[in-house]
Amino acid sequence: MLNRSEPGLFVDSGAAGGRIDELLELITNGRPVWQRDALCREHPEVDFFPGQGGDTEPAKAVCAACLVAVECLDYALADKTLVGVWAGTGARARAATRRAADRQRKASA
């Protein structure tokens, strides 16, 4: 199956798809490949890092329409050092999600 991943570039999403994604990550300054498709890149006027007490609603609205929000949330949950709005969540919400997942893991062990 072919996926259009860049203008003018078709990539086989079969077995080689993972290797191509790894190569693309290397040539995009080490950033995850999914970030190329993030809707926040198209909204420089929105502040995704408003600081404590800042308005996060505009950023969350952009995230709500983003096609890579699942990948973004996985990325943000994996890195406790990230600040700002990622996948429509703030740092406190992500910390609460991590704690809930830890409790669930411990309860099922």
Image (tube, rainbow, N blue to C red):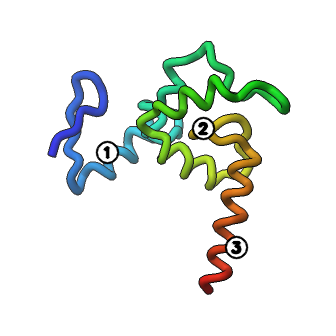
Circle 1 or circle 2, nearest the eye: 2
Which three-letter amino acid code belongs to the residue tagged 1?
Ile
Answer above or below: position of 107 versus 7.
below
Which three-letter amino acid code belongs to the residue tagged 2?
Gly
The residue sitting at 63% across, 53% down in the picture is 77
Which three-letter amino acid code belongs to the residue tagged 3?
Arg
Q: Residue 80 bears which disc, if any?
A: none
The residue at the far top in this view is 45
The residue sitting at 63% across, 76% down in the picture is 105
Circle 2 sits in a helix, a strand or a loop, which is it?
loop
- Residue 85, given in percent of the width and then of the height, sits at 66, 35
The residue sitting at 54% across, 27% down in the picture is 62
- Residue 34, given in percent of the width and then of the height, sits at 44, 39
Tag 2 residue? 88
- Mark 2 or mark 1, which is nearer the start of the sequence? 1
Answer above or below: position of 39 versus 109.
above
Q: How many marks?
A: 3
Where residue 52 sits, quadrant-wise, is top right
In the foreground, 103 or 25: 103
In the foreground, 60 or 51: 60
The residue sitting at 22% across, 38% down in the picture is 3
Q: Residue 103 bears which disc, if any?
A: 3
Answer above or below: position of 82 versus 63.
below
Circle 3 sits in a helix, a strand or a loop, which is it?
helix
Circle 1 sits in a helix, a strand or a loop, which is it?
helix
Tag 1 residue? 20
